[in-house]
Image (tube, rainbow, N blue to C red):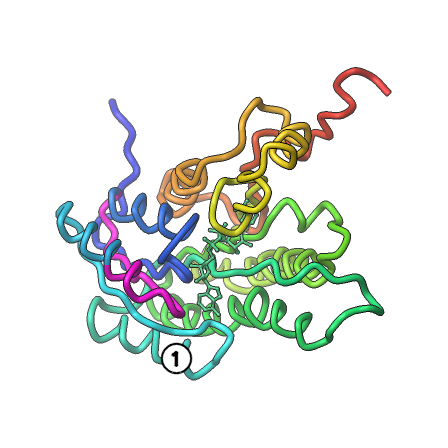
């Protein structure tokens, strides 16, 4: 007997998939047989490149521009998917930003609103479109990419941490709402994964050393670590998992500083 991740016949939308984790998630879903929608906001060249790469490898993909923080863009993203591939079976709310570092009281509220708009309202706008379609099919999977900062506070990034903690509660609440329609909703919380979002940290030897002290395993995460986890959670191998967060973080939540006592 063998076990495989089989997503043949499924249509998957991955937001913010022109780079980083989203790109890897789209690639793994495609390798498992899903038709994928590469969503981008500004990086058309990169989105075209990954779409072509998937087509060249024998997969099915389209790319669609849409800003997830704009409700009309999101509606167009789902309608274009309906027309070109069919209604979505899988939604991965991956698009996100960490925003500018700013301390509360000495900050710009517009920046807080921008982070919440992309990281929390964006997944909400996408999810409501997905749920309408998945309810008709009585089947679907929604993955919300949160962060270890749904659990761990991050000074100077209160908007980011709040958006991810909020998204985690959205996962749980929605999972309760839609379970009867065979729709699963799961959060994936990455730890420190090497992508453009945190290149300023891992690209500098001093800050890299500091960051590695926060991870129990002796390495940072790679984008593949997230792509593989999401492909598993979207598949029938995970058919009884819903309403929880899976940290994919090499043990960052294990407080590795306590390893030597304390
Ligand atoms: P990234 O910057 O490579 O990817 C973010 C993507 O979101 C980009 O493609 C960007 O164009 C897109 N995006 C931003 N605003 C958008 C909008 N309004 N509409 C559509 N797309 C938009 O960084 P990443 O590390 O791949 O981040 C992906 C997700 O993973 C984010 O939600 C991030 O918070 C989360 N995350 C990353 C890490 C990490 O260590 N890399 C850790 C925890 C959580």
Can you tell me whether the CB of the residue at mark 1 lies under 8 Å from the nearest atom of ligand 1?
no
**Circle 1: is it few (<14), some (14-19), or many (20+) Cα within 10 Å?**
some
Q: Residue at x 32, y 58 (%)?
A: 12
Q: Residue at x 42, y 44 (%)?
A: 230
Most extreme residue toward the top, as rendered? 260
Number of on-image labels: 1
**Where's residue 106, x and y in %?**
82, 68
Quarter of the image for the N terminus: give it. top left
When the figure is inspected, residue 171 is found, relative to residue 8, above or below; the finding is: below
Quarter of the image for the C terminus: give it. top right
17 in the magenta segment: no
In this view, the residue in front, 92 or 116, is 116
Disc 1 is placed on an element classified as: helix
**Where's residue 199, x and y in %?**
52, 46
Q: Residue at x 52, y 60 (%)?
A: 96
- Range of residues picked out in magenta: 32-48
**Where's residue 49, x and y in %?**
24, 56
Most extreme residue toward the bottom, as rendered? 72
Q: Quadrant of residue 101?
A: bottom right
Q: Residue at x 54, y 37 (%)?
A: 248
Q: Quadrant of residue 104?
A: bottom right
When the figure is inspected, residue 205 is found, relative to residue 41, above or below; the finding is: above
Residue to which mark 1 is pinned? 75
In this view, the residue in front, 44 or 186, is 44
């Amino acid at each position: 007997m063998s076990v495989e991740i089989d997503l043949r016949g499924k249509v998957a939308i991955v937001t913010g998939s022109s780079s980083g984790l989203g790109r890897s998630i789209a690639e793994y879903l495609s390798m498992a047989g899903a038709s994928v929608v590469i969503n981008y906001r500004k990086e058309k060249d990169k989105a075209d490149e990954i779409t072509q790469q998937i087509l060249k490898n024998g997969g099915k993909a389209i790319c669609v521009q849409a800003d997830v923080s704009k409700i009309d863009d999101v509606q167009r993203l789902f309608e274009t998917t309906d027309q070109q591939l069919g209604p979505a079976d899988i939604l991965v709310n991956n698009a996100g930003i960490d925003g500018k570092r700013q301390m509360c009281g000495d900050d710009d509220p517009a920046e807080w609103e921008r982070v919440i708009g992309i990281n929390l309202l964006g997944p909400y706008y996408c999810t409501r479109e997905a749920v309408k379609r998945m309810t008709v099919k009585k089947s679907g999977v929604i993955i919300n990419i949160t962060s270890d900062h749904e659990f761990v506070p991050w000074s100077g990034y209160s908007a980011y941490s709040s958006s991810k903690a909020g998204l985690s509660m959205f996962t749980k609440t929605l999972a309760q709402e839609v379970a009867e329609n065979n729709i699963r909703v799961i959060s994936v919380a990455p730890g420190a994964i090497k992508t453009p979002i945190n290149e300023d940290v891992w690209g500098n030897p001093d800050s890299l050393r500091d960051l590695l002290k926060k991870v129990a395993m002796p390495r940072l995460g790679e984008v593949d670590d997230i792509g593989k986890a999401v492909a598993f959670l979207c598949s029938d191998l995970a058919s009884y998992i819903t309403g929880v967060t899976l940290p994919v973080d090499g043990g960052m939540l294990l407080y590795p500083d306590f390893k030597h006592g304390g």
